[in-house]
Amino acid sequence: MKALLRAASFLGLTATALLLQASCARSVGSEDDVGPTLLAPNATNPGELTVCVATECPLPWASCGGGLCTTNTLRDIEHCGACGHTCPKPPKSFHASSVCTKSKCALACDELSADCNHDEGDGCEVYTGDDPKNCGGCGKLCAEGEICWKGACGCPSGFSTCGGECKNLQSDNSSCGGCNSECVAPPTNDPAWVCGPGIAPTNTEWGCAGGGCSLVCKQFYSNCDGNLCSNGCEVNERTDRLNCGTCGHACGANQDCVNGTCICPEGTTRCGDRCVDLDVDTDNCGKCGNGCLGAQDDTANGGPRCSGGKCGYVCYAGYANCDQLLENGCEANIGTDPLHCGSCSTKCDAARGQPCVLGQCLTKPCEAGPGTF
């Protein structure tokens, strides 16, 4: 009789153990209880699962009308601190723009503007570029009689104070030799007409030089041979190979002068009106006229590249060309796309609404329960 009781007890314990084992197997392997892991969210055999699918966005991320958990409420100006909380656009008189910083709207002053009274009600009310009491910054006071010009007290070396501005009296056509002394052509009988009464040689004009008004060469032209009255300012420094950029600066063999610079140095090739490196130029990759294909607009998130004379396509950091089509560029944002999370081949559990945050499928520790180890 005792032997039969011991046998029955043993069978009961064995059955209980088998039931617990089956229960554990269902808890660990059931698709209803666990989801993709952080490291391999679409793995077919994840092994022992210790993390489960999470669907609630971690702070400061939120789902604000776009993809899951793609909005950073710390700095998003349209969702500052919370979805739909848009920072107001300040009026032009504020000389500022709105920003979102640490989930709060704030004003960012324009260059040389400042909020010296610390009152956001009137924005950045002081222009520190010409205010002698706040010159270059709030409370920076200029000395008595000094002007504030471009955010600095007084005029720099070589400049003189003319009204509320600093002028170079040696070269300023509006203040040549003295404040408000405009440089204009003198009467035709004035001896300043060095080539004869009213005669202005080729490519010359009246301008301020050395504090006096005289005939000078127009911009980009030079009198390299010294014969001003016979042929004027005969050299165009933008295109002259013997006087490129300045008199006497000659370009080397097989070089051209373009915009005052000798171009097509060794290692480059002239294609049309440009000197290019065929190893890296995307418009002339390997040979002139061989342009690399692929989307190049602002939405492409990447662009064509030429390396070693061969074309390719390179994505910006955080993007990938998952559909392998060049016409739409790098269409996948692998930092937020739950179908391409961290890589083209990694998918989050879309059926459960598992978001992709910073290139990883969102997970959380599994809750303890029956059969969970």
Image (cartoon, rainbow, N blue to C red):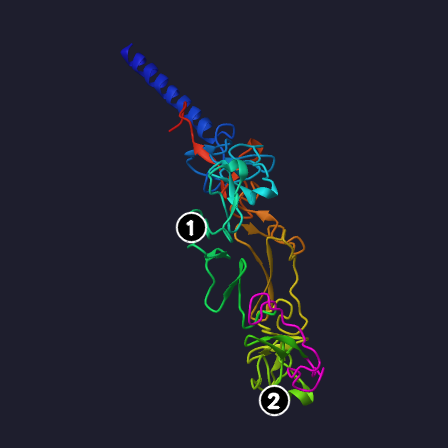
Q: Which residue is label 1 attached to?
A: 140
Q: Where does the N terminus fall, quadrant-wise?
A: top left
Q: Where does the C terminus fall, quadrant-wise?
A: top left
Within-10-Å neighbours for mark 1: few <14, some 14–19, many 20+? some
Point out residue 266 in the picture as x, y percentages from the top left corner: 55, 81
Q: Which residue is label 2 attached to?
A: 226
SS of the residue under disc 1: loop
Q: Pick the residue in front: 98 or 82.
A: 98
Point out residue 141 in the picture as x, y percentages from the top left corner: 42, 51
Within-10-Å neighbours for mark 2: few <14, some 14–19, many 20+? few
Query: Magenta region, mostly helix, strand or loop?
Result: loop
The residues colored magenta run: 174-203
Q: How many marks?
A: 2
User: Of all residues shown, which one is farthest toward the left?
Assistant: 2
- Residue 315 visible in image: yes
Q: Is residue 202 above or below residue 97?
A: below
Amino acid tagged 2 = Gly
Q: Which residue: 35% across, 19% down?
A: 13
Amino acid tagged 1 = Lys
Q: Quadrant of residue 313?
A: bottom right
Q: Which residue: 43% across, 54% down?
A: 144
Q: Pick the residue in front: 25 or 317.
A: 317
Marks 1/2: CA–CA distance: 51 Å
Point out residue 311 in the picture as x, y percentages from the top left corner: 61, 66
Whether residue 101 sits left or right of residue 196 in the image: it is left
**Magenta stretch containing residue 268, yes or no?**
no
SS of the residue under disc 2: loop
Q: Is residue 129 above or below residue 258?
A: above
**Magenta stretch containing residue 197, yes or no?**
yes
Q: Is residue 14 above or below residue 121?
A: above
